[in-house]
Amino acid sequence: MKTLATETLKTPMTTDFDPQDRGGPAQPLLVVNNLKKHFPVRGGFFAREKKFVHAVDGVSFAVAKGKTLGIVGESGCGKSTTARLIARLMAPDSGSMVFDGDGVAEYGGMALKEYRRNLQMVFQDSFASLNPRMTIVDTIAYGPQVHGMEAEKAMTEARELLSRVGLEPDQFASRYPHELSGGQRQRVNIARALAFHPRMVILDEAVAALDKSVQAQVLNLLQELKAENQLTYIFISHDLHVVHYISDEVMVMYLGQVVEQGPVEKIYSSAAHPYTRALLSAVPSMDPAHRTQHSPLSGDPPNPINPASGCRFCDRCEFTQDVCKSTTPSLKLVQGESEHVVACHMNDQHSGYTRQGAMR
Amino acid sequence: MDMNLSLTSSSIAAPTQSRSYWHVVARQLRHEPVAIASAFVLFLIVMAAVFAPWIAPADPFKASMLKRLLPIGSSGFWLGTDELGRDMMTRLMYGGRLSLVMGVVPVFAAFFIGTSIGLFAGYVGGRINMVIMRVLDVFYAFPSVLLAVAISGALGPGMSNSLIALTLVFVPQVVRVAESVTTQVRQLDYIEAARLSGASAFSIIRFHVLGNVLGPVFVYATGLLSVSMILASGLSFLGLGVKPPEPEWGLMLNTLRSAIYSNPWVAALPGALIFITSIAFNLLADGIRSAMDIRR
């Protein structure tokens, strides 16, 4: 598995001219700036103060063309909300997005419909994401028809896509979702996303519900499709093995914020945030000699309703000092690195943290 | 598998060769013997009503003082005669016309109006939804019989007024079913995926929401058919619906009331027909409900 990942990582950017590529290879395909979404909490009728769940709280990142960005984190850390915000299935409270140089849904920028043709999403629940009343070929052909493709052409393309994702069209095209297995349904969802000829696909826990062998098949299919169609992926998962395999870049989220981001090998070999460390040490090892001996983290994430200032991880962190409770750390480059950023006072010489490098 | 069943579909996602949903449902309905039997009974009743002028043995209005309240089985009058000596069989056939219309029309009207409101309220959600539903809850506060009587009474007697009254009684109920199903469907991932396709709200409702909402609402509305017939008969019985001498099952039940001791079997006939028809509607609805679950 690993060899394939490094291979794709080193695949050079295509030199062929792509008419869709407006910004050139150096322009990130998607830049997300300070994205925020706070959900109001229903207080009692007489509650004076409005409370908010800080689901996504100031998330910024960029995805380079042709790369895969993995987003990891515990349940409830805002991964899926981030995905829905990026896809604009939800309106963000604040923040902006730039898709290949064009502002998304802003004056003079890219229209939402055009943006959504370029950006597609595959959901976790393969069954709920297919209309139970539509045959799968109709489901795949629906999107392109929305964008003005003739029904007949859309059907032909849908059948081609079906065979591309490994489902024999003659056998599967007119089946209903309930007549397929989970892996087959997820292949249909992938085909549905690809029918738009998108440039970016968000995979929101797309393989999480599949069993291991099917997972591997679907992951390999995703890698092949990415190379064929010059796709860029945002891959959201809680499965660190899978993220390691498929990602070029990894972003770690905790309670609605980015705590660390960097190239996949950097994150997996020299994580700079105590939370990332804890996450990685929680991954079960294949070698019984290296079994996890003590619990890397205890407790649950703190309540995301109106979180206190300071580092959000400080309650669970073994290196906490006073500064962690009073000041919120911001993302800063890890010393001696050019792409690896972390939001931790231990990494910042001037933060007032006294035990620099205690984690190492 | 027979895959080439349907070649016609007006949807933009028209399948070129697929098994359309309704064909699957129809095929499954064939395996529901009770539903088939009910459909057959309903077919007979509807046919008798539709073709009453041609097949009825007598004139529904021709009274005869000499032949009043003949029992079932009398020669020339197989089902006896009513309190004015009119042929019961003829009047039951003619009565079916009005009774069925009163049963079907309000439900159909409420089905279209209610589904539209429910889809809108459920899909839009939020405050608009809340306002619509709370307003309709006012109608819900009254028992449906009382509400039908009240509206009918306010509008005045007459058939069209009772049709309006019954429609108004059923609309909130249909809205509620449609709204709750729409709210459930709306948050499923395939609606998100459809939104992601850039489709307009109308297109999403038309192709993704409607199809999945229609089933449960349709089944619910089929169940209302019998209620509607009984309510309509009730209105006529109270003198708010059809006026004599027009034959209508509810009204016939009313006028034959006086004969309940002298000739109970004849007096019970209109009631029996109301009963049979509504049971048949209900059983058919049950069959359709299970046939609509294509996941079997």
Image (spheres, coloured by chain):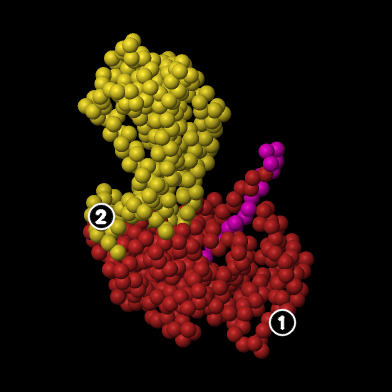
- Please, is residue B35 above or below residue A74 in the view? above
**Disc 2 versus disc 1: nearer the observer:** 2
Could one spot residue A342 in this view of the protein?
yes
What is the secondary structure assignment of the residue under circle 2?
A: loop
Q: Is residue A102 left or right of residue B142?
A: left
Q: Quadrant of residue A81?
A: bottom right
- Reply yes or no: does residue A59 show up in magenta: yes
| Along the line of sight, the residue nearer the viewer: B215 or B288 | B288
- Reply yes or no: does residue B285 show up in magenta: no
Q: Quadrant of residue A20?
A: bottom left
| Along the line of sight, the residue nearer the viewer: A216 or B284 | B284
Magenta span of residues: A44-67
Three-letter amino acid code of the residue under disc 1: Gln
Q: Which residue is mark 1?
A: A293
Residue B6: mark in rendering? 2
Q: Is residue A268 left or right of residue A128?
A: right
Q: Which residue in the rendered view is the most extreme toward the bottom?
A: A289
Disc 1 packing (10 Å; few <14; some 14–19; many ≥20): few
Q: Colour of chain B?
A: yellow
Image position, residue A330 (x, y; %): 63, 65
Q: Colour of chain A?
A: red
Residue drawn at point x = 59 percent, y = 82 percent: A269
Q: Is residue A169 left or right of residue B124?
A: left
